[in-house]
Every structure is written in structure tokens, then in C-alpha cells.
Image (cartoon, rainbow, N blue to C red):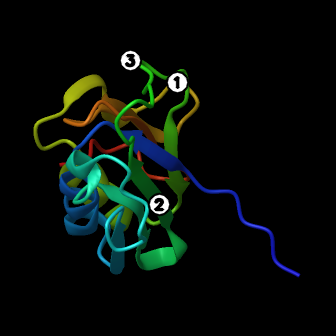
């Protein structure tokens, strides 16, 4: 039996745009279902919103997201960050560079006091990402 823990991101009405952006960063296969397709659009304005989206990215990444239907609140802010970590410097640096487009850089991707390469940003959709490249060299990534 397999158990998997993965992020499920909530948006008001731009889950499709966010998932397409993440698809451009992580690659893989993206599937989306709208409220209309699932016969769950109680408000006509919700018909084209994403009821469930899933990105099966390369390297085993799994990310899910949806839009909130009318009448459902969405948090203004979350205390959860998404962490990408591993020792594949080229892949993780490429992910960082992709996520950084339009992002607010909190900590640049540089050698951290613990010896790994680490960076933190909030992407253009308001999601905070931490990238940690373990065992990487002391050179600064490009």
C-alpha cells in the first residue's frame, strides 16, 4: 500500500493559470476538471472554475489545486510553504529559475550557513516555495 502527502493549493479563480504556470516549470502531465464538467456548478459563475487540477510532474512531483466556488471563503494568507529538496542541482536550479518568474525573492538561491544551497520565494500566485539543494558545491547557482 502506498501513502503520499502532497500540496493541494487553493485559489479564488486562477487555479488554471497557476497550474499551467507550474506545468511550464515542472513538466509532466496536467489534468483539470471544471465545476461544470463535474456537474457541480451551483452558481453559473463557477462553471469554468477548476474543481480539481492535478499536475504529475517529472521526478515524482505531485501538485494539486482548485478554485473556490462562490460563497466559499479562501484564506488571504497561509502559513504553509512548499519545499523542493534533493541533490539534483541542475533540476532544482531550473525549478527555482522557473518559479522565480514574477516572484518576490525572500532569500536568493545561495550557499546557506548549513552548507547546502537554499532559496525562498513567493511566486506570482502567492505561494511560498523553499528550495534546498543538498550536497551542492559552494559555487553560486546561476
Mark 2–mark 1 Cα distance, whole angstroms, equals 29 Å
Residue annotated with mark 1? 113
Neighbour tally class for label 3: few under 14, some 14-19, many 20 plus, Cα within 10 Å:
few
Q: Where is residue 38 in the image (x, y as percent from the top left)?
A: 42, 71
Which structural element holds mark 2?
strand
Mark 2–mark 3 Cα distance, whole angstroms, equals 20 Å
Give the mark nearest the N terminus, 3 or 1. 3
Give the mark nearest the N terminus, 2 or 1. 2
Residue at (53% x, 36% y) in the render? 115
Mark 3–mark 1 Cα distance, whole angstroms, equals 32 Å
Q: Which of 128 and 71 is in front in this view?
A: 71
Q: Position of residue 110 (x, y in %)?
A: 33, 34
Q: In which quarter of the image is residue 69?
A: top left
Give the mark nearest the N terminus, 2 or 3. 2
Which structural element holds mark 1?
loop
Q: Nearer the viewer, mark 2 or mark 3?
A: 3
Residue at (80% x, 69% y) in the render? 3
Residue annotated with mark 3? 76
Q: Can residue 132 be seen in this view?
A: no
Which structural element holds mark 3?
loop
Residue annotated with mark 2? 63
Q: Where is residue 26 in the image (x, y as percent from the top left)?
A: 32, 67
Amino acid at each position: 500500500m502506498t501513502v503520499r502527502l502532497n500540496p493541494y493549493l487553493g485559489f479564488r479563480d486562477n487555479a488554471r493559470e497557476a497550474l499551467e504556470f507550474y506545468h511550464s516549470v515542472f513538466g509532466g502531465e496536467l489534468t483539470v476538471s471544471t465545476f461544470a464538467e463535474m456537474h457541480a456548478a451551483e452558481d453559473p459563475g463557477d462553471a469554468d472554475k477548476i474543481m480539481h487540477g492535478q499536475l504529475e510532474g517529472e521526478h515524482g512531483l505531485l501538485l494539486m489545486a482548485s478554485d473556490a466556488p462562490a460563497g466559499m471563503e479562501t484564506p488571504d494568507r497561509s502559513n504553509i510553504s512548499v519545499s523542493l529538496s534533493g541533490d539534483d542541482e541542475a533540476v532544482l536550479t531550473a525549478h527555482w529559475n522557473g518559479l522565480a518568474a514574477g516572484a518576490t525573492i525572500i532569500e536568493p538561491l545561495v550557499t546557506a550557513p548549513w552548507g547546502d544551497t537554499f532559496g525562498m520565494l513567493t511566486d506570482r500566485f502567492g505561494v511560498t516555495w523553499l528550495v534546498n539543494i543538498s550536497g551542492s558545491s559552494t559555487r553560486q547557482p546561476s
